[in-house]
Image (cartoon, rainbow, N blue to C red):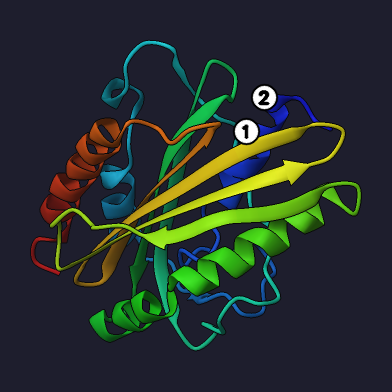
């Protein structure tokens, strides 16, 4: 079984499962038609090191492998994508943000409708099984939609709790807090070992992202 720090790095990508973001060469992913203006907007929304207390450091860039079970979004057009993740004490916990801009409001809403709890759960389990192989059993303990903070035009909050059973058993908790305004969607994603991260901390960071989303969305 992998060490906890390595597990945290792996799950940095898994936390994004079902949240409208896809890995390279994914035939179901939205097409990319990059806009310089939208890329600047997306970058301006991301969490930065100063948003965190001491002990958090930037994580290496990683991508989740594509999920066979993910919805087909190949007809949508993505004009910007930015992401950044931070680790606490080598990976025992992590928090990151992902920002996606779509070509139209309608496409952003289509993506939002497809980002269901069921899709998130299925993709997370599939990715975990692919990553760890037959030697590790994945057992989902709970997958729930929690009351979402009233931020942006739309908001969601998913929490997934699961066990990875190998030589030892590790309990993982992944949370996704999504906010959408206009063409832009933002996802705060977190991973922790054992227990969820404090709700107050996740709510505070979500509010930071929502404020930046409103500022970046002006006039588009």
The residue lying at 61 percent from left, 48 percent from top is: 162
Question: Is residue 62 at least partly visible in the picture?
Answer: no
Q: Nearer the viewer, residue 195 or 96?
A: 195
Quarter of the rendering occupied by the N terminus = top right
Q: Quadrant of residue 35?
A: bottom left
Q: Residues within 10 Å of mark 1 (few under 14, many from 20)?
A: many
Please indicate whether residue 219 sits to the left or right of residue 212 in the image.
Answer: left
Q: Residue furthest front?
A: 141
> SS of the residue at dot 2?
helix
Q: Give residue 203's position: percent from left, percent from top.
A: 23, 40
The residue lying at 43 percent from left, 12 percent from top is: 55
Please indicate whether residue 96 sits to the left or right of residue 26 in the image.
Answer: left
The residue at which mark 1 appears reads as 8
Q: Quadrant of residue 139?
A: bottom right
Q: Nearer the viewer, residue 217 or 162?
A: 162
Image marks 1 and 2: residues in contact by CB distance under 8 Å:
yes
Distance (Cα) linking label 1 and label 2: 5 Å
Q: Residue furthest right?
A: 135
Please indicate whether residue 11 sits to the left or right of residue 161 in the image.
Answer: right
> SS of the residue at dot 1?
helix
The residue lying at 87 percent from left, 52 percent from top is: 133
Question: Is 1 situated above or below 39?
Answer: above
Q: Residue furthest top?
A: 54
Q: Give residue 19's position: percent from left, percent from top.
A: 46, 63
Question: Is residue 119 at least partly visible in the picture?
Answer: yes
The residue at which mark 2 appears reads as 5
Q: Give residue 166's position: percent from left, percent from top.
A: 84, 39
Quarter of the rendering occupied by the C terminus = bottom left
Q: Residues within 10 Å of mark 2 (few under 14, many from 20)?
A: some
Q: Give residue 145's position: percent from left, percent from top.
A: 36, 62
The residue lying at 57 percent from left, 75 percent from top is: 29
Q: Nearer the viewer, residue 42 or 128?
A: 128
């Amino acid at each position: 079984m992998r060490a906890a720090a390595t597990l945290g790095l792996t799950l940095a990508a898994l936390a994004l499962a079902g949240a409208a973001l896809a890995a390279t060469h994914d035939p179901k992913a939205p097409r990319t038609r990059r806009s310089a203006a939208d890329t600047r907007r997306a970058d301006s929304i991301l969490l930065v090191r100063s948003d965190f207390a001491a002990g958090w450091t930037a994580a290496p860039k990683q991508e989740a492998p594509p999920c066979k079970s993910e919805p087909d979004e190949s007809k949508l057009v993505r004009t910007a994508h930015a992401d950044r993740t931070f680790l606490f004490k080598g990976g025992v916990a992590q928090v990151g943000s992902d920002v996606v801009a779509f070509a139209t409001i309608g496409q952003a809403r289509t993506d939002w409708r497809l980002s269901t709890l069921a899709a998130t759960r299925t993709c997370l389990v599939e990715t975990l099984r692919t990553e760890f192989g037959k030697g590790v059993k994945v057992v989902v303990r709970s997958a729930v939609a929690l009351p979402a903070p009233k931020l942006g035009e739309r908001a969601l909050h998913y929490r997934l709790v699961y066990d990875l059973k190998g030589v030892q058993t590790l309990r993982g908790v992944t949370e996704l807090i999504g906010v959408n305004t206009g063409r832009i969607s933002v996802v705060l994603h977190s991973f922790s070992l054992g227990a969820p991260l404090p709700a107050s901390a996740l709510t505070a960071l979500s509010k930071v992202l929502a404020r930046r989303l409103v500022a970046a969305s002006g006039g588009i």
